[in-house]
Image (spheres, rainbow, N blue to C red):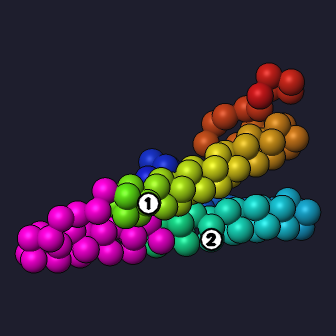
Amino acid sequence: MANPLTNEKEIYEKIQKEGLQIPKEIQEILNHHLRNDTQVIMFGIADLRHGLIELIQTLTALQSTQKPINADDLAGSLQELVTVCDSVLIRSHCIRRFLAKLHEVTHQESLIGFKAKAGNE
């Protein structure tokens, strides 16, 4: 993970030691939302990366042949990349909304020390 909690190892150890389990309904909703949204984000990032590589290769090829760059083509390519970025941002926001909603309806103290306040989330 890119940004683990400072006590993440201890949290996992506690979960395993105490045999803590996520109720089936929560597990289903977590899997549905997080897996679907993260998959879309991964595809979006892959498309964005591929588009940038193509754009760089095209600009490099045009520069080496000293052909003029068509501004409309360049703007179209960049707009496609902006559209991919927008899609990734939307799905990221969906994950944040989902997690906030799940936190709101569970109202339990978490292992990292946060406590949900009913109606204040």
Which amino acid type is shown beneath numbered disc 2? Gln
- At label 2, counting other C-alpha atoms closer than 10 Å, the crowd grade (few under 14, some 14-19, many 20 or more) is few
**Residue extending furthest right?**
25
**Residue extending furthest top?**
120
Location of residue 10 by image quarter: bottom right
Residue 62 forms part of the magenta stretch: yes
Location of residue 42 by image quarter: bottom right
Q: What element carries label 1?
A: helix
Residue 10 appears in the figure: no
Residue located at (31% from left, 56% from top): 71
Measuring from the top left, give residue 88's x and y in whole percent. 56, 56
| Residue named by callout 1 | 76
Measuring from the top left, give residue 11's x and y in whole percent. 59, 55
Measuring from the top left, give residue 38's x and y in whole percent. 62, 65
The front one of 95 and 55 is 55
The front one of 71 and 115 is 71
Residue 18 forms part of the magenta stretch: no
Residue located at (18% from left, 65% from top): 68
Q: Which mark is residue 56?
A: none
| Residue named by callout 2 | 39
Q: In this view, does 56 lie to the left or right of 49?
A: left
How far is mark 2 from mark 1, CA to CA? 26 Å
Q: The magenta stretch spans which residues?
A: 47-71
Which amino acid type is shown beneath numbered disc 1? Gly
Of the residues tagged 2 and 1, which is closer to the observer? 1
Q: In this view, does 54 lie to the left or right of 118?
A: left
| Mark sitting earlier along the chain (2/1) | 2
The front one of 105 and 92 is 92
